[in-house]
Amino acid sequence: MTAAILSTGTELTRGELVNTNSQWLSEQLTSLGFTVVECTAVADDQAHIIDALNRLAKQTRIVICTGGLGPTTDDLARESAAAAVGADLICDETVLEAIKARFKSLGRTMAQSNTKQAFFPSSAVVLPNPAGTAPGFAMTIQNALCFFLPGVPREMKDIFELHVKSRIRELAERTSYQVHLQTFGLTESNMADQIAQLKLEESFGENTTPSVTIGYRAHFPVIELKVLARASDEKEARIVADRIAEKIRERLGSYVFGGRNDTFAEHLGRVLREKRLTLAIAESCTGGLVGKLVTDVPGSSDYLLLDTVTYSNQAKGAILGVDEELIAQKAAVSVEVASAMAEGVLRVAGSDIAVAITGIAGPAGGTDEKPVGTVCFAVATRATPTKTVTRKLPGNRDYVRVLSAYIAMKMVVEAAQLL
Amino acid sequence: MTAAILSTGTELTRGELVNTNSQWLSEQLTSLGFTVVECTAVADDQAHIIDALNRLAKQTRIVICTGGLGPTTDDLARESAAAAVGADLICDETVLEAIKARFKSLGRTMAQSNTKQAFFPSSAVVLPNPAGTAPGFAMTIQNALCFFLPGVPREMKDIFELHVKSRIRELAERTSYQVHLQTFGLTESNMADQIAQLKLEESFGENTTPSVTIGYRAHFPVIELKVLARASDEKEARIVADRIAEKIRERLGSYVFGGRNDTFAEHLGRVLREKRLTLAIAESCTGGLVGKLVTDVPGSSDYLLLDTVTYSNQAKGAILGVDEELIAQKAAVSVEVASAMAEGVLRVAGSDIAVAITGIAGPAGGTDEKPVGTVCFAVATRATPTKTVTRKLPGNRDYVRVLSAYIAMKMVVEAAQLL
């Protein structure tokens, strides 16, 4: 069952916007069991839109078209769809009243140009838009069921979820299932080697169903591992995918921290909550990034007591009680200062665990002995000796900071699990 | 002069990757003066790739194709390009030696599969790849000059900059110039109203050249304003765009903080550096985000002395000296506590300016009187009375946090400019 995506908008062909709609829709259609053969973006030009619509509707069974439903003259989806099948545009009075009512509720009068948004090709079915003025619509063009959705991502997703999914779900034969595992701390090739040693293929044989494909997707510094199983139906595929994912999870151990859409900071939050532990952070080169990531999670105020970013040595002394002489002797980027920072912030905040990061994120500040990318970490708790680590991290300022933040969070998780 | 972009890769049609290559190339081609008529992504399927290549090469003068240059069986760019013109693939011995040498320098032997990367259609010109094993190539298909580049963004960009730009620059007639202004603090419609009042069109007349188009692009919470001028040549267009941009800049005043690619944190850094001022930050609901943004700028350790994230009331007392009774009386989210935090962090850090943020980012924690989105700000300096602001910000947790961070930075800039 094939599908195609057509995005319209000159902002796309001019490169003013990354086409995230196309990625989201491809992912949705793929997970529903469709094979997306093409994703195309064309400018707001009626002849181009009609050509692309006809071409894609001839080749595939489902076409999802986004954009061009606004009230202005460069919004051409309705006209193009009608022209593709030689239909007229007719006014849907119910939609027109709804648009008028919407403007009235906002204390405004509907502009004449908005009238356009109530016109649809005569053969179309209207798809209501819960959030905006512009409804979508569905109609058949050539062999394909075509859906026309707004370009605004939130509205596009709402209409897809509410009105498109249920209409197309039964068209695709779902014979696959994918499990997602989030990992941090191993390289792709290291994971691939470890998974190869599991000899998964022996369970199934190369040319028989069910079959399993392992994929990787990096969102630095997290690598998502995808276990895709194909079988005679979705239920069987799911059983296989779950079983294989479980084997991989066992093998990779604590490098796997979650499933689809899980973040490392959520994982950290779950561990701290489970153990009823509180956290304090002392940052230097990460500049607040660890705190930002930890507090991205709603409710993190339950366990995060304090984060300090002590860039200056004076602040390291005044806030964390780090001895100026220690800094003079050992340098600000040293495991000794990292320890003193962690122990200092633990004491000041009265938390159960504290982590400290001090390093050289670059581009300046490196020396022969401590090049850019040198970062010292320390984790202190009320119960165990302070643990320190020095790492020489590759990459530019952004990479060093992001990777440092994840290493710090991972050290907190490991310390918490021992308490 | 028309152009098209063809991205190949099943990871794109399956929605596993956002197609940033396509956006980057569209932007480059547009700024070189080309009209990009279509951006298409197809799966790793030779028949589809050949169809798309022939179709786009017939319609346009330039086609940029990315992906499919790797060593594996699903890398099909070479085969597809050769098939499109009925050419053979022949081995380029120089490239083969370079690939072998590259492996040798890494202490490894070249795998047989890499041999493939030295084969090119007989009519192609090789485009060396400074970073990877896979060179690109250029050849004519139908009416179009077609460039084949790797899918890895870094390598694609390098080859484009080094070998494609110079070859295509002279093909396009550049008659336009665009100036970018970064703004924060005004809505798009408010800016549009103010710009309308400048009556820019009176300077030029509607149907005559030069003409000017004003565009907007939101990267929440920053709105980029684009002034695109078209004239008889690029030089004239630039003079017009610069003049109009200057008029707009005057009108919008301090809401404009920079030009293309400038960030607000860089603007803040410039102001602090110019005035030789130092900064301290006391965050609560933003959780380290202000510090993160400020320290995204290399060299920010010159002016940022300290950032504290005092989530707990105990920490607000211990670190910043905020009176527990004040918190009990006025609540943690209040202008009084914001003032005490700003004055506390100013004192502890010994900085010239300090800013404090305390608020309810949600989703929980709101009350009738102080709903989610209520955020209190304070800026303290050594020379002027502490200034406070309370805002009720719309949107979800992310929006509230990001917008709060920008409001705080803006308050610092305003305070610094008065010192």
Image (cartoon, coloured by chain):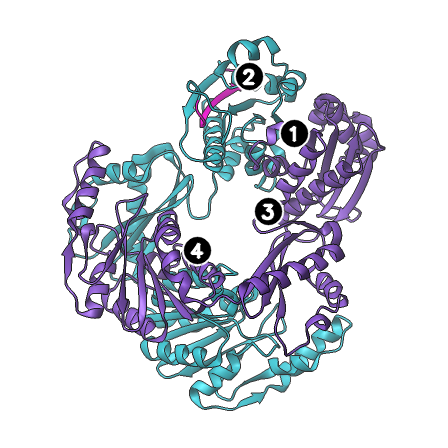
Chain colours: A purple, B cyan
- Mark 1 or mark 3: name the one nearer the start of the chain: 3
Q: What residue is disc 1 on?
A: A303
Q: Residue at x 72, y 64 (%)?
A: A195
Question: Residue at image x 20%, y 47%?
Answer: A95
Report the side of B333 relative to B54 (left or right): right
Residue type marked 3 = Asp
Observer-side mark, 3 or 2, equals 3
Q: Is residue A396 magenta?
A: no
Residue B316 in view here = yes
Mark 2 crowdedness (10 Å alpha carbons): few <14, some 14-19, many ≥20: some
Q: Secondary structure at mark 2?
A: loop
Identify residue type, mark 1: Tyr
**Mark 4 → mark 3, Cα distance in angstroms:** 20 Å
In whole angstroms, how far apart are the C-alphas of marks 2 and 4? 47 Å
Image coords of residue A183 (percent x, y):
67, 52
The residue indicated by pointer 2 is B382
Tell me where residue B367 appears, x and y as whole percent.
45, 21
- For the residue pair A164 and A120, the one nearer the viewer reads as A164
Q: Which mark is residue B115?
A: none
Inter-mark Cα distance, 1 to 3: 19 Å
**Numbered disc 4: what chain?**
A
Magenta includes B383? yes
Q: Which residue is mark 4?
A: A20
